[in-house]
Amino acid sequence: MFQQKLTESLSLYKLFPGEPVEQISVLLGENRTPMTLYDFLIARVRDVDESDAAAVHFDRQRFRDNYFTTADMFIVGSDGSMLAVPYENKQGRDLVHSLRSTDQLVNWSLPVDADVYETFRESDGVYIFTQDEVAALRNTRYALPERREAFWKEFAFRGEDNADDLFDETLALVQEARGGSVKDCMGVFPSTSEGMRLVWLGSVDNYSSDASSDLGLSYYFGRLVGVVSDGVAISAGGVAAAKSDLDNSVIDAL
């Protein structure tokens, strides 16, 4: 009966495990949108409306207990600085959508030309870490607490009016699970390699909700999550009414 129910509906969220460089095209091919750092963080603190049809597909605790690969990017430049680029940024999104195979990678990162890197500096929503800040964060992901807090509020929470509250709620979750403060929670850890990597979000307990790019695009244990894209409705019974050719027999638990 449980399996039958799974095959009768389309999950709002679907996990795409494996190497992110290969899985992103699979996710997009199923007409899904990859979850961003913002999406995962909101999923960890959101209140679920039980009357919402999507709520039947939502398990907040699983978002808290697991690490995930997000669609946001950390791009390390040749000068040692690093740019945090949101998936909503078209230029950045095109980079993510260009991922196909490990043949594209150098040191597990997607190369980004110096002139392209410079154009990102002026792009919307990009958060910049200087060379010295990157060096400090590589030494310890919990360095520069004020800069990290600004990163979470301005980048991860997209500078929303309630970004302060969302940051406080997320920090409170980590503190409840493992104690500490912003001085040793919600770290930022840059890759040591140049180029673009996706941002990984640590679990609330074991990895204190860190944002990192130390794991490469070909890391086998990637955990991208795709959300049903616009044009696909979830009915009250959990059955998908799609205008696309989505296969509604595929369901994944996070």
Image: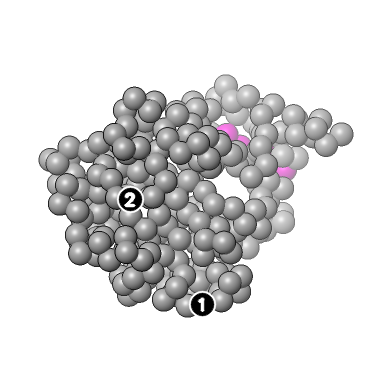
Q: Where is residue 116 in the image (x, y as percent from the top left)?
A: 17, 40
Crowding around mark 1 (Cα neighbors within 10 Å: few <14, some 14 to 19, many 20+) is some
Q: Can residue 117 be seen?
A: yes
Query: Looking at numbered disc 2 in the image, what kind of residue is underneath it?
Result: Ser
Question: Disc 1 marks which residue?
Answer: 180
| Residue at the outermost right position | 1
Question: Disc 2 marks which residue?
Answer: 191
User: Observer-nearest residue: 209 or 251?
Assistant: 209
Q: Can residue 228 be seen?
A: no
Magenta span: 232-236
Query: Looking at numbered disc 1 in the image, what kind of residue is underneath it?
Result: Gly
Q: Is residue 235 magenta?
A: yes
Q: In this view, does 39 lie above or below 222?
A: below
Locate the N terminus and report the quarter of the image it occupies.
top right
Residue drawn at x 40%, y 54% is 212
Looking at the image, residue 52 sits to the left or right of residue 120; the answer is right
| Residue at the outermost front position | 139
